[in-house]
Image (cartoon, rainbow, N blue to C red):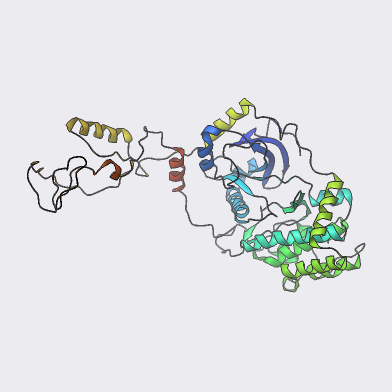
Amino acid sequence: MEPLDTEVDPRVVGPFELLARLGAGGMGVAYLARGIPLDSLSGEVALTYNMIDPDYSAGGDESRLLVVKMIQPQLLEGDPQSRERFGREIDAVRAVVSDRVPALVAYAEDPEIAEPWFAMDYIAGPSLHTLVQESGPLNVGPYAALGLALVDALRAIHDAKLLHRDLKPANVVLGPDGPVVLDFGLAVLMERSTSNALTQTGHWMGTRPYMPLEQLRDTKHVDRPADVYALGATLFFALTGKSPYPVVPLATAPKWDGIQPDFIPLLAQILVPAPGQRPDLDAVEMSLCNLLAEADLTPELAAEELRAHVAAANLTPELPPGALTGSVAPAVRELAQQAIDADLPEVDADFYGIVDTDEIEGAADTADEAGPAGGYTPTLVDPAPAQSAEPKPAADEVQPADSPGPAPEPGEDSVPGLHTTRFPRESDKPPQSPSFPQGTLPIGARKVAARLRKTYAHRAEL
């Protein structure tokens, strides 16, 4: 965690204040952030920034820390696929609901927004890479607890029809409630079509020391066994502090130097070049439970040992001063207000059939001068065929059943066979559509209208 660079890093993103830089990768930059209270804009913020978490107040929460991830600025201009790939990462995080994956809070990926971003829960704890490097390999209890948590995470990811494709020690954070898997930048739908895939056949993506041989050869066509291999490689690191192979995966078995014999059978089944020979997640879970049983431990005791090990290491990143207790400065609130105003979508009223309310109100004024209107003024209209004007019958003339007649006095029942020329009683009137001055449609309406420009079909491909 590093202080913000005031010349490079933004101070606010949407309704969030950025507090520190967490890190950067090839695709994005991650920041520690918190909500900015904007009570008067709570509903507008929720619509504009796709607030997903129902427990999060759209008005901001200064005590809840978040991670805001943005695209590397140079990629927006130099890589035409970066925005789409970033949007697919948002889709992946949104699709997986699990205690082993951070909850998505909000996101902004509309083309109108210059720099897309998303916000998710911050997990306070060290990465597995940092923990093992600083405090040494894990014992059987913490090791098995880690493995069981990663099985749960991958199961939730696979149940969402996704593949992670980049599980590694640096993407596992050991939080207060156990391990959590991060970084869905390479996540992909299992059912993907060749026409829409961003990853090309024959190309590799991921972290080579932790990927299987088939992913090194062709990332696009890997399946669940690739994630299982990465799980095994991550567990190998938890015991040794290094990856199974120094640079790239090989077709030969890794060296087991320094690994206790009890751990080798499971790892030897996972770290094989042939995907079809690897165990599935259920088999991995069973092997880990058997390992615990042999050590006279339950999964609950093992999870507690892991938490104690993490706490004793004292490697949780230190937060910036005032991150949890300090109030948001007025200048920061003003910056957030400006950012939100800049992100609100504009709507082409003619394109969406939105009628100039000034014209409607002018027509209503004309009707008032001619007599009682008795109606309501809509702001959205559907085109209807023109009707020829017919002479209005005299007030005392009885009309046929299919013709309009005089209106009954207030409180009277309608005369059978007659239709009224006015609205019925006040309680029976259709609800009035709100009338807004021209150019001041509610943000919600503008947001919905702007979304109509986009294709609503679910992405067939990550």
Q: Residue furthest top?
A: 330
The residue positioned 70% from the left and 44% from the top of the image is 122
Q: Which percent across, then down, holds residue 281?
A: 72, 67
The answer to whether 433 is drawn above or below residue 237 in the figure is above
Q: Nearer the viewer, residue 386 or 395?
A: 395
Hey, which quadrant is residue 318 in on the image? Answer: top right
Instruction: Look at the image and tell me whether residue 225 can be seen.
Output: yes
Is 160 on the left or on the right of 271, as rendered? left
Residue 186 x %, y % = 66, 55
User: In this picture, is 358 found above or below 400?
Assistant: above
Q: Of all residues shown, which one is farthest toward the right?
A: 258
Q: Is residue 50 left or right of residue 24?
A: left
- Give the side of residue 282 with respect to residue 407, left or right: right
Image quadrant in which the N terminus is located: top right
Closer to the camera, 410 or 52?
410
Residue at the image point whose x is 37% and y is 40% from the top? 349
Quarter occupied by residue 193: bottom right
Taking the view exactly as shown, the residue that stands out farthest to the bottom is 277
Q: Classify residue 140 by image quadrant.
A: bottom right
Query: What percent of the width, then of the height, locates residue 160?
Result: 61, 61
